[in-house]
Amino acid sequence: MSGWLTRKGAALYTRSVSKPPLSPPAPVFPVVWTALFALMGVGAARIYLSPPSAGRSKCLTLFAAQLAFNFFWSILFFNAQAFGAALIWLAILWALILWMILEFRRVDKLAACLQVPYLLWVSFAAYLNFGVWALN
């Protein structure tokens, strides 16, 4: 849904925004995000299928919160082209992902491990976001 809502903004971004070194070509992003969402989904499913507990509920709430932050980052970055605000938003998203991983680990260690590539990619996205903000 986020990709669909931001397709015009992403096209404008691709044509008109200066990008930092190490910026991947546009076709890389959907491939990476597909893999990350699959890992996120499997991890969340493992948590969901674990025995009901306060920890499980906290994990699922954090999963939903970070997913919402993930969704709205694209709108801020691509559609609004508010690169500074998107960077702050991304820092909050990064913190939510880390918190989620730590809470997942208490319930299901594998579910937590499956989120690590997501945290690493969002770290790289922060570098890219910062670079775009600095260059534009």
Image (spheres, helix red, strand yellow):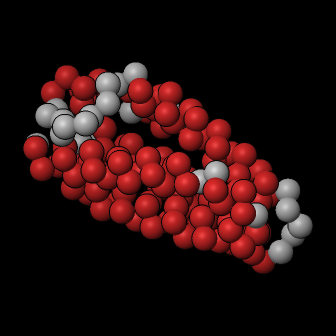
At x 59%, y 54%, the residue is: 115
At x 45%, y 52%, the residue is: 120
- In front of the other: 23 or 135: 23
Q: What quarter of the picture does the C terminus occupy? A: top left
Is residue 109 placed above or below 72 in the rendered structure?
below
Give the image location of residue 35, x and y in percent: 58, 35
Q: Is residue 8 visible?
A: no
Q: Residue furthest left?
A: 135
Is residue 131 placed above or below 51 in the rendered structure?
above
Q: Residue furthest right?
A: 51
Give the image location of residue 51, x and y in percent: 89, 67
Is residue 7 placed above or below 132 in the rendered structure?
above
- In front of the other: 69 or 126: 126
* The quadrant where residue 63 appears: bottom right
* The quadrant where residue 61 appears: bottom right
Q: How many marks?
A: 0
Give the image location of residue 56, x and y in percent: 77, 69
- In front of the other: 18 or 83: 18
At x 83%, y 74%, the residue is: 53
Q: Is residue 87 visible?
A: yes
Taking the image as shown, residue 100 lies to the left or right of residue 81, namely right
At x 10%, y 44%, the residue is: 135
Give the image location of residue 106, x and y in percent: 72, 73
Taking the image as shown, residue 47 lies to the left or right of residue 123, namely right
Q: Residue furthest bottom?
A: 54
Taking the image as shown, residue 69 lies to the left or right of residue 34, namely left
* The quadrant where residue 60 appears: bottom right
